[in-house]
Image (cartoon, rainbow, N blue to C red):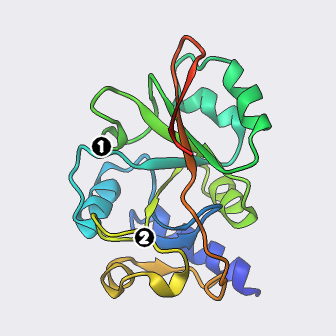
Amino acid sequence: MSQFSNDLDQCLLALNKGDLILYPTDTIWGIGCDATNEQAVAKIYALKKRIANKSMIVLLAEEKDLLTHVMQPNLQIFDYIKGVAKPTTVIYEGATGVADNLLNEDGTIAIRIVKDPFCRELINLFGKPIVSTSANLSGYPPPAIFDDIDAEIKNGVDYIVQHRQDDIHLAEPSAIIRWNNNGIPTIIRN
């Protein structure tokens, strides 16, 4: 069995138990869990020492999955997503089908459709969205490579993906936009 396949299997075991994973995303290394499991999400807040009203990102594998997790998405978003090259997280109004503690105080949700093969395969096999938050303690910069991840984070998760640990390409967080129901995007982070 390849390391890629073994990582997928181990991640699925962890996610199905409500455990935390440390994994490479289409941007930076992230801490992940089942985005529909409120207790698992709470574990991430505790591990990162992050205040609970600071929401996290949800990863989806397919654009069509937005229809399951966003009430009445503006259909223009599909054209926008196709037109951007950089991984882009979109903040949507009217979140549904995810743990309540992932929602921002105003009911919005941050979602990114991933293009990374490992993430896409994991989410498709899991059949549910996965949380992705930077693999750092709150207040510290996000790690650009695996070796920059704090030992406290590594020791606090239940499974660490082996795939791409040796990448030396300095990763960056995604761009973030807010997509209002009027169809006008607001850039939060380039």
How crowded pointer 2 is (Cα within 10 Å; few <14, some 14-19, many 20+) is rated as: many
Three-letter amino acid code at disc 1? Asn
Question: On the rendered image, what quadrant is the N terminus found in?
Answer: bottom right
Q: Position of residue 52 (x, y in %)?
A: 22, 49
User: Which residue lies under the disc numbered 2?
Assistant: 135
For mark 1, give the secondary structure: helix
How crowded pointer 1 is (Cα within 10 Å; few <14, some 14-19, many 20+) is rated as: many
Mark 1 and mark 2 residues within 8 Å of each other at the beta carbon: no
Q: Residue at x 31, y 49 (%)?
A: 38
Q: Position of residue 119 (x, y in %)?
A: 65, 61
Quadrant in the picture for residue 48: bottom left
Q: Relative to the observer, which residue lies in front, 63 or 159?
A: 63
User: Which residue lies under the disc numbered 1?
Assistant: 101
Quadrant in the picture for residue 83: top right
Quadrant in the picture for residue 152: bottom left
Q: Nearer the viewer, mark 1 or mark 2?
A: 2
Q: Position of residue 148 (x, y in %)?
A: 46, 83
Three-letter amino acid code at disc 2? Ala
Residue 93 lies, with reference to residue 166, above or below; the image says above
Residue 4 lies, with reference to residue 103, above or below; the image says below
The Cα atoms of the two marked residues, 1 and 2, are separated by 19 Å
Q: Residue at x 24, y 59 (%)?
A: 50
Which of marks 2 and 1 precedes in the sequence? Answer: 1
The furthest residue to the top: 182
Q: Residue at x 50, y 88 (%)?
A: 147
Residue 59 lies, with reference to residue 27, above or below; the image says above
